Amino acid sequence: METGIVTIKGQVVIPSKIRRRLGIKKGTKVCFIEGNEDVVIRPLTKDYFEKMAGFLKTGGQMTKGLLETRKQDRIREDER
């Protein structure tokens, strides 16, 4: 287990061993996932997005549905 200290500005240094293992470099964006009594910090790297690609496995149907809904909204707005 690695530890760190929160600064007065709310900053935390991620230990170098963990940064190297997870590929976190200067400028890497991270997300904070809040649990009941914990926080998970996850790097938003290319590997993360590749792993999440196809997560919903909708075959593009969700995007098509959203585009169609937006098209119908525009038609209704134009009729006003």
Image (cartoon, rainbow, N blue to C red):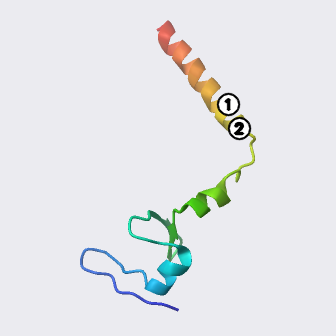
12 and 17: which is toward the camera:
17
Q: In the rendered view, does 50 fall on the left or right side of 17?
A: right
Q: Which residue is mark 2?
A: 60
Residue drawn at the location 55% of the way across and 20% of the way down: 73
Q: In the rendered view, does 66 fall on the left or right side of 23?
A: right
Residue drawn at the location 67% of the way across and 30% of the way down: 65
Mark 1 lies on a secondary structure that is helix
Counting the numbered discs, the total is 2
Q: Residue furthest bottom?
A: 1
Residue drawn at the location 52% of the way across and 69% of the way down: 42
58 and 75: which is toward the camera:
58
Give x and y (percent) for residue 48: 60, 62
- Tell me if mark 1 has few (under 14), some (14-19) or many (20+) residues whose alpha carbon lies within 10 angstroms of its own: few
Q: Residue furthest top?
A: 79
The correct choice, above or below, for 2 with respect to 35 in the image is: below
Give x and y (percent) for residue 15: 43, 85
Mark 2 lies on a secondary structure that is loop
- Tell me if mark 2 has few (under 14), some (14-19) or many (20+) residues whose alpha carbon lies within 10 angstroms of its own: few
Q: In the rendered view, does 21 fall on the left or right side of 56?
A: left
25 and 2: which is toward the camera:
25
Q: Which residue is mark 1?
A: 64
The correct choice, above or below, for 57 with respect to 21 in the image is: above
Tag 1: amino acid:
Lys
Separation (CA) of disc 1 from disc 2: 6 Å
Tag 2: amino acid:
Gly
Give x and y (percent) for residue 61: 72, 35
Q: In the rendered view, does 56 fall on the left or right side of 74?
A: right
* Residue 20: numbered disc: none
Q: Are marks 1 and 2 in contact (CB under 8 Å)?
A: yes
Give x and y (percent) for residue 72: 59, 18
Q: Residue furthest left?
A: 8
